Image (cartoon, grey):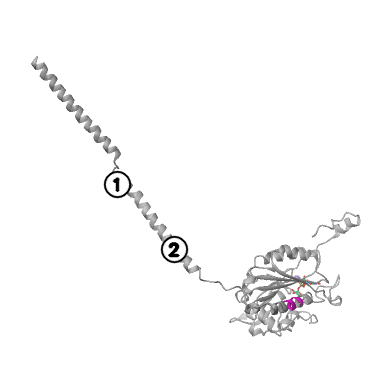
C-alpha cells in the first residue's frame, strides 16, 4: 500500500515537472513571437541596394542643381532676322508655289517674308494665304509696266522678271527700318527668293552670318548642273558658269544674300530692269561689293543647298473642252 502511494507521488511529481517545463517552453515561445528577429544576414543585400540607390539619387540631384545654376544667367544673343523678298504673279500654279515656299519658311526661325505681287492691287488669294501662313510677313504690290512685262507666248528670257517687285521690297525695307526705334534696326540679312525655287533649310543657317555679301552655289541653272563661285584659300577668285563668265557677278538671284546694314548704307542700290540679259544680279551687286569681299558659304561653295527649279505650266486642254460645254470646274473653288 505504502509502495503504491510512493509510486503515485513520483508520477505526480514527474507530471508536474513535465507540465512546468512545457509551460515555460510555451511562455518562452510566446515571448519570442513579439520580438524582432535578428535578420541582419537576410536583409544585407536589400539594405545595400537601398543605400546605393540613395547615393545615386543624391548625385543626380547635385548634377541637376549644378546644371540649373549654369543655365540661368546666360542670355542667348538674338539671331539677326532674315528678310526674304519674293516677287510673285498670278497664274495657275501660284498658290501651289506659295504654299510650298511658306511651309519651308515656317521651319526657319527669325524670318520676315516680304511678298510683292506683280499686280495693280493685292489679290485675295495671296492675302488669305499670308493670313493663314503663320509667318511674319509684309504684303506689297507693284505692277510691272506693260511694255516691260512678258506677253503670252514670249520666250521667258526676253525680259527680266520680278524687277519692280524686288525694288519695291527694298524701298519698304529701307523705310520700315528707318522708322524702327532701337540700335538693332540695322541687324539683318536680305535674300531674294523667287517663288518657284527649292530651298534647303541649311541655306538660311548659312546666310544668317552675312557681314556684307555672302555667296554659294545654285543647282540646275544656266544650262548647267550647278553654277558656283570658285574659292581658293577662302576667297572667291572666279565663277564656274557656262555663259559669259566676264559678267561682274555671273550668279543667279538665289545664290547670294546681302547684309541689311549694307542695303541701308547704299540707299540707291536696286535692280536695273534695262540691264542686258544676265546682268540683273550684277546691276544690284556691283555698287555694293567687290569679288574679293564676297563671303563664301556652303562649305567654301562646295555644296548645293538651293535649286533653280521651274514648274511646268499645267495643260488645260480638258478643262477648256469641258468649259465649252458648260461643264468646266467650279470657279468658286480656289486652286
Ligand atoms: C531667272 C532668275 O532666277 C530670276 O531671279 C531672274 O529674275 C530671272 O531669271 C530674270 O532674268 O529676270 P526664271 O526662273 O527665269 O529666273 O524667272 P521666274 O521664276 O519666271 O521669275 C522670277 C520671279 O519673278 C518669280 O518669283 C516670279 O514669280 C516673278 N515674276 C515673274 C513676276 O513677278 N512677274 C512676272 O511677270 C514673271
Ligand atoms: Mn524661276
Q: Which residue lies furthest to the right in this view?
A: 325
Q: In which quarter of the image is the N terminus?
A: top left
Q: Which residue lies furthest to the left in this view?
A: 2
- Magenta run includes residue 317: no
Which region of the structure is painted magenta? 168-172
Give the structural element (helix, strand or loop) at label 1: helix
Q: Quadrant of the C terminus?
A: bottom right
Our reading of the magenta stretch's main secondary structure is helix
Q: Residue at x 76, y 76 (%)?
A: 168
x, y (%) of residue 255? 68, 75
Occupied quadrant, residue 115: bottom right
Front residue (pair 22, 267): 22
Q: In this view, does 53 lie above or below 264?
A: above
Front residue (pair 94, 75): 75
User: Would you name the residue on which mark 2 appears?
Assistant: 63
Disc 2: CA contacts within 10 A as few (<14), some (14-19) or many (>=20): few
Front residue (pair 53, 249): 53
User: Would you name the residue on which mark 1 appears?
Assistant: 41
Disc 1: CA contacts within 10 A as few (<14), some (14-19) or many (>=20): few
**Cβ atoms at labels 1 and 2 below 8 Å apart:** no
Give the structural element (helix, strand or loop) at label 2: helix
Front residue (pair 293, 62): 62
Q: Residue at x 24, y 34 (%)?
A: 27
Whether residue 5 appears in this view of the structure is yes
x, y (%) of residue 94? 78, 65
The image quadrant where one finds ligand 1 is: bottom right
Amino acid at each position: 500500500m505504502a509502495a503504491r502511494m510512493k509510486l503515485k507521488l513520483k508520477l505526480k511529481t514527474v507530471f508536474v515537472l513535465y507540465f512546468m517545463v512545457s509551460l515555460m517552453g510555451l511562455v518562452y515561445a510566446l515571448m519570442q513571437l513579439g520580438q524582432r528577429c535578428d535578420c541582419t544576414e537576410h536583409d544585407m543585400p536589400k539594405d545595400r541596394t537601398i543605400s546605393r540607390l540613395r547615393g545615386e539619387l543624391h548625385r543626380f540631384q547635385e548634377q541637376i542643381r549644378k546644371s540649373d545654376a549654369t543655365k540661368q544667367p546666360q542670355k542667348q544673343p538674338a539671331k539677326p532676322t532674315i528678310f526674304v523678298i519674293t516677287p510673285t504673279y498670278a497664274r495657275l500654279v501660284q498658290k501651289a508655289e506659295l504654299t510650298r515656299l511658306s511651309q519651308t519658311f515656317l521651319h526657319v526661325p527669325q524670318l520676315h517674308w516680304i511678298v510683292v505681287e506683280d499686280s495693280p492691287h493685292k489679290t485675295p488669294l495671296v492675302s488669305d494665304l499670308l493670313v493663314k501662313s503663320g509667318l511674319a510677313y509684309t504684303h506689297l504690290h507693284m505692277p510691272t509696266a506693260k511694255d516691260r512685262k512678258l506677253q503670252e507666248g514670249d520666250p521667258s528670257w526676253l525680259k527680266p522678271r520680278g524687277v519692280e517687285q524686288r525694288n519695291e521690297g527694298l524701298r519698304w525695307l529701307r523705310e520700315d527700318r528707318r522708322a524702327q526705334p532701337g540700335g538693332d534696326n540695322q541687324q539683318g540679312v536680305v535674300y531674294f527668293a523667287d517663288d518657284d525655287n527649292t530651298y534647303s533649310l541649311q541655306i538660311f543657317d548659312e546666310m544668317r552670318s552675312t557681314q556684307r555679301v555672302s555667296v554659294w552655289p545654285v543647282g540646275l541653272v544656266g544650262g548647267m548642273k550647278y553654277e558656283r563661285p570658285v574659292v581658293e584659300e577662302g576667297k572667291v577668285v572666279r565663277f564656274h558658269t557656262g555663259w559669259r563668265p566676264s559678267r561682274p557677278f555671273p550668279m543667279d538671284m538665289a545664290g547670294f544674300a546681302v547684309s541689311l546694314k549694307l542695303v541701308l548704307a547704299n540707299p540707291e542700290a536696286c535692280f536695273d530692269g534695262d540691264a542686258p540679259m544676265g546682268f540683273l544680279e550684277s546691276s544690284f551687286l556691283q555698287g555694293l561689293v567687290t569679288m574679293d569681299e564676297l563671303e563664301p558659304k556652303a562649305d567654301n561653295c562646295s555644296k548645293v543647298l538651293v535649286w533653280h527649279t521651274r514648274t511646268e505650266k499645267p495643260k488645260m486642254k480638258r478643262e477648256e473642252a469641258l468649259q465649252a460645254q458648260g461643264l468646266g470646274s467650279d470657279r468658286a473653288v480656289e486652286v
